[in-house]
Amino acid sequence: MYEVISNELIAPGIHRIEVRAPRIAAARLPGQFVIVRRGEGDERIPLTIADADTQAGTITLIIQAIGEGTEKLAAIEPGGGIRDVAGPLGMPTGIEKVGKVVCVGGGVGTAVLFPLAKALADAGNHVTAIIGARSEEFAMLRDELAEFCDEVIVTTEDGSLGIKGFVTAALGEIIEDPARRPEAIYAVGPVPMMAAIAEQTRPSGIHTIVSLNPIMVDGTGMCGGCRVTVGGEIKFACVDGPEFDGHLVDFRELATRQQAYCDDQHCRLADATAQTGPEDDA
């Protein structure tokens, strides 16, 4: 049993949970995830390791309570436990010092973005973070990102905080400014958002990495639910990724397959996390 040390509500329906898992904390690298199971017979849920404290032996998970499995996890009080936490899983992010980088997070994708941005800053890069949300109350982790990012830009659909609009508009301004144009872009969020960003950066050839966490199911590659065509080859996001070159991902195929399996719970998740605009047709 893995002890829950803290459980904090950081946005409506979104919890930041600290779990005691010393071996995972010591081994994890940015971009990796864990599979958690609340109790015997419960759903297996892949979650990105948002942060880790090796001295305390803890990992931080950010959970959006939107289905039965995530609601059970989000309801665990400090002192309670999680039966299974398996990991770290997935391929870690290739962190290098390249100069200017932009990290774009949409919805709960900001939780996945956080450890990537932190590692890139620690490597000596100039990091700009763009986070998108429906409204101010959903714009999570902006203060935490500001602690190590050189710039944090917030966009909200209703204009209640930062720039009114979508992350693609804010990113476009940076790309068009020669003094701010980055060498690399990391995008994490709903699939339509990542597809739009990949198309947005394709003409300029800016290296664009996308994290396909939203399409993972069991986290082992056995179910095949996370298969994706990358550069003409079939890959599995949970074992070959979750990060891929966004310019090589066949997003049209991916979006079509996602719709085929879009049951009520997954559709509600997509609606809750969407931070996209007219570019979604790309």
Image: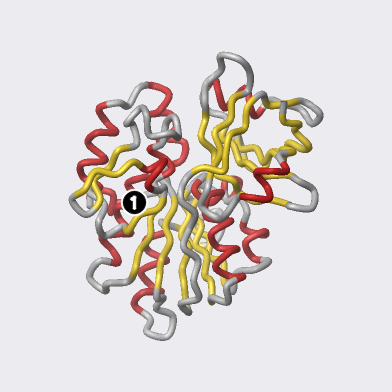
Residue 103 position in % (x across, y down): 48, 63
Task: Determine the image quadrant of residue 237.
Answer: top left
Most foreground residue, 212 or 271: 212
Q: Is residue 104 above or below residue 10?
A: below
What's the residue at 35%, 22% (across, down)? 263
Q: Is residue 53 above or below residue 35?
A: below
Most foreground residue, 184 or 164: 184
Q: Split into 4 quadrants, where in the image is the N terminus?
A: top right
The total number of labels drawn is: 1
The crowding category of the residue bearing disc 1, from other C-alpha atoms within 10 Å (few below 14, some 14 to 19, many at least 20), is some
| Amino acid type at mark 1 | Gly
Residue 187 position in % (x across, y down): 42, 57
Judged from this view, the residue extending furthest toward the bottom is 179
Residue 273 position in % (x across, y down): 46, 40
What's the residue at 77%, 38% (across, down)? 6
Most foreground residue, 28 or 80: 28
What's the residue at 54%, 68% (across, down)? 120
Most foreground residue, 80 or 222: 222
Task: Determine the image quadrant of residue 16.
Answer: top right
What's the residue at 65%, 29% (across, down)? 74
**Which residue position holds label 1?**
277
Q: Is residue 209 left or right of residue 123?
A: left
Q: Is residue 35 left or right of residue 221?
A: right
Q: Is residue 101 above or below residue 196?
A: below
Residue 10 position in % (x across, y down): 67, 43
Judged from this view, the residue extending furthest toward the left is 232
Q: Is label 1 in a helix, a strand or a loop?
A: loop
Say how the picture is coloured.
secondary structure
